[in-house]
Image: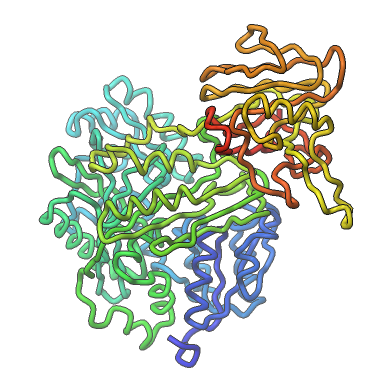
Amino acid sequence: MSTTNLSTFDTLLIANRGEIACRIIDSARKLGLRTVAVFSEADRGARHVRLADEAVLLGPAPAKESYLKVDALLDAAASTGAGAIHPGYGFLSEDAAFAEAVEAAGLVFVGPTAEQLRIFGTKHTARDAARAAGVPMIAGSGLLEDVDAAVAASQAIGFPLMLKATGGGGGIGMTVCRTEAELVESFPRVARLAGASFGTAGVFAERYVENARHIEVQVFGDGKGRVVSLGDRDCSLQRRHQKVLEEAPAPDLPDSLRQELHRTSRALCASLNYRSAGTVEFVYDSARQEASFLEVNARLQVEHPVTEAVTGVDLVEWMLRLAQGGGEAKSVLAGLPDGLPVSGSAVEARVYAEDPARNFQPSAGTVTNAEFPATNGVRVDAWVETGTDVSTNYDPLLGKVITSGATRGEAFDRLAAALAGTRIDGIETNLGMLRAVTGLDVVRSVGHSTSTLDSVGDPEPRITVNRPGLQTSVQDWPGRTGLWQIGVPPSGPMDDLSFRLGNTALGNPEGAPGLEFTMTGPSLTFTHATTVCVTGADVTLTVDGTEVPAWTPVTVPAGGTLDVGTAAGHGLRGYILFQGGLDIPEYLAAPPPSPWDSSAGTPDGSCAPATCSAPSSPPPAQLRGRCRWTAVPP
């Protein structure tokens, strides 16, 4: 499509942020559309703001004061001449009232109709529509008025069962009950959570499938009754009901069942004259080889790139062309079969700003280094780059790494290689876990389920900073040289002799990065056995409470804690060197930040309690491991 045959709008406002805003802008530009980004105060410097032709500030960082502020979004569209709004995913993407407000303002809502959003937006009405269309269904209830109704429903459903919030999403309000006592205890809590999170306390129950897989079918409707399916996906690799890795097509699915899921998904959406992109989700019981309806996501999914990889379709382009109406809309599905063929396999890994050492809590801070692979067979949809400020105000998704291949094994091999070449410093991420998952036998052999990741953490070596010490910073020798002319001093360790001697004792190059502290040292806990050497100021050292000597290589066992005390004799500055060194990104032509450089973490450049990864006693020449001294409040 070119700008000469645009019939409805030539300017698109993207009511979203992050990687999906960047991705929508990319397709819109290919179609010749002018793009408008919106942003909060926290996202002033974000990538999507720079990519768009124009950008409008919505308000402060909290989503309810910016990205969820309907009036501000409509005002932004009016002031920039936008004729259409694409909601992306999350935020207002499935909000029927927002879709109505957009169209009432004379704009095009790039997505389903408001009525379709209402029907699919609550799980009990979606189940009713699915049942009427003949979609496979699991035993379940309608809306439950109270705990007595839930107990009565359990007699027909059986245990275990799952309570769900009818307006839920992202796993919120989902609770497994294995006995009647657990059901009675859980029902009030789920109802309260549903009311607080989604504005409706509606709860229903359905049979819980042990070791289930999550299967979904991508559909696209023209709004006139024609719906096509674009293959399927397996999204079983989840943590806390949040998808982490997805692939297309779903592996080891019986052909007859696959065809049934595609057919009934099309029938369900066609029964409502569904418009635009959507996904019909199922729970798959691999033991019984049975699938049952879960829900419909009436929007573009996070994992849509794997479908694009195996079908060759740009789903965002289809959405935009359909939204233009007229002949352009009619041409989107013209001549296509009901079920589009797929070729090869694709897999996607979601990179989250999460701290594995703190039970995957969200991580925030400045990304000091971002590296993504740029090779054939690898696609990266990301919004973070070096210098990006990541906030906890929004979803922790930083980006997605997508790989494809002729076979499933080839796609996973490429993903493993791509993740090995992906690096983000300055904040904590789940990259270590993602790298581990690609090599799990249970995943490669298709023995995985939605609970597989419950027991998978980050196996890469890490250091948890229990106490930061005073002005602790990462240094190397000789530091930043050759920058005096622009006012940057050489930096490096103040007592470089002690620093170099410690590295030499460990067999490292004498300039390998280590830690420098002033007066009081840190307390560090190691996930893997690590050999260290503490030099410089006279301090008392203990490993798990037992005193150990300075100036001598000491091995801290896996799970052990090195505690460096306060200088009580000669010298003020001390050094902690690690066998194998620390692998950190360069900054102003040297790996470590200086003590007076705020990029180190806290405003004075010192380390706050944090987590970093470190080497597990590799050969001296192998400077490996990850170190991210992030600013985390004590």
Task: Say left or right for 480 vs 259.
Answer: right
State which quarter of the image contains the C terminus.
top right
**Frontmost residue, 354 versus 548:** 548
Instruction: Kindly identify the residue that appears in the image at 55 percent across and 68 percent down.
Output: 14
Q: Is residue 225 above or below residue 430?
A: below
* 426 on left or right of 201: right
Q: Residue furthest top?
A: 546
Image label count: 0
Determine which quarter of the picture holds residue 212.
Answer: top left
* Viewer-side residue, 357 vs 61: 357
Q: In this image, 602 relative to 107: left or right?
A: right
- Residue plotted at (61% across, 70% down): 51
Q: Is 205 placed above or below 525 here?
A: below
Color scheme of the displayed model: rainbow
In the picture, residue 411 is in which quadrant?
bottom left
**Percent coordinates x, y for residue 249 in the rendering:** 26, 57
The single residue placed furthest to the bottom in the displayed view is 4
The spot of residue 600 in percent (x, y) is 74, 40
Which residue is located at x 38 percent, y 74 percent? 318
Q: Pinpoint residue 162: horizontal percent, then vertical percent.
A: 30, 34
As drawn, 585 above or below 261? above
Q: Provide residue 623's location: percent of width, then percent of height.
A: 58, 38
Front residue (pair 626, 239): 626
Quarter of the image with the N terminus is: bottom left
- Residue situated in front as seen by the camera: 82 or 232: 232
